Image (tube, rainbow, N blue to C red):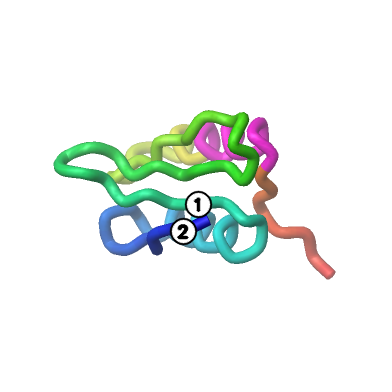
């Protein structure tokens, strides 16, 4: 899958998760076109993309976003070895 790399368009905490999912689990990332939201693309094409917030709001938003990633097959935080 051809994927973009996350940059300053998303907050640091989100960027860390996105980079891990791209590098370790085969997910994809699509930069926003115009004023839209960046999208995180699950490794399974049967799953719908997940919007990545552009501005940090509350810890609850971050936790809900992580829960959506887990529901679509992603793993965060990485398991310790």
Highlighted magenta segment, given as a residue range: 63-73
What residue is drawn where x is 66% and y is 31%? 71
Question: What is the residue that sits farthest to the front in this orientation?
Answer: 1
Q: Nearer the viewer, residue 33 or 62?
A: 33
Question: What is the residue that sits farthest to the left in this orientation?
Answer: 34
Residue denoted by label 1: 28
Q: Is residue 81 above or below residue 51?
A: below
Q: Would you say residue 25 sits in the magenta stretch? A: no
Residue 16 is left or right of residue 12, and the answer is: right
Residue 22 is left or right of residue 6, and the answer is: right
Image coordinates for residue 47, horizontal then vertical, percent? 59, 31
Residue 62's label in the rendered image is none
What residue is drawn where x is 69% and y is 48%? 75
Cα distance between the residues tagged 1 and 2: 7 Å
Q: Would you say residue 64 sits in the magenta stretch? A: yes
Residue 2's label in the rendered image is 2
By secondary structure, the bulk of the magenta-drawn segment is best described as helix
Q: Kindly state the secondary structure of the residue where label 2 is placed.
A: loop
Question: What is the residue that sits farthest to the right in this orientation?
Answer: 81
Image coordinates for residue 68, horizontal then vertical, percent? 57, 32
Q: Quadrant of residue 36?
A: top left
Q: Kindly state the secondary structure of the residue where label 1 is placed.
A: strand
Dot 2 alpha-carbon crowd within 10 angstroms: few under 14, some 14 to 19, many 20 or more: few
Image coordinates for residue 4, horizontal then vertical, percent? 39, 60
């Amino acid at each position: 899958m051809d994927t973009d790399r996350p940059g300053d368009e998303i907050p640091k905490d989100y960027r860390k998760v996105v980079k891990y999912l791209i590098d370790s689990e085969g997910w994809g990332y699509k930069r926003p076109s115009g004023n839209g939201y960046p999208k995180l693309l699950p490794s399974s094409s049967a799953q719908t993309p997940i919007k990545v917030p552009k501005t940090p709001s509350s810890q609850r938003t971050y936790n809900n976003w992580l829960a959506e990633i887990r529901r679509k097959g992603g793993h965060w935080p990485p398991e310790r070895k």
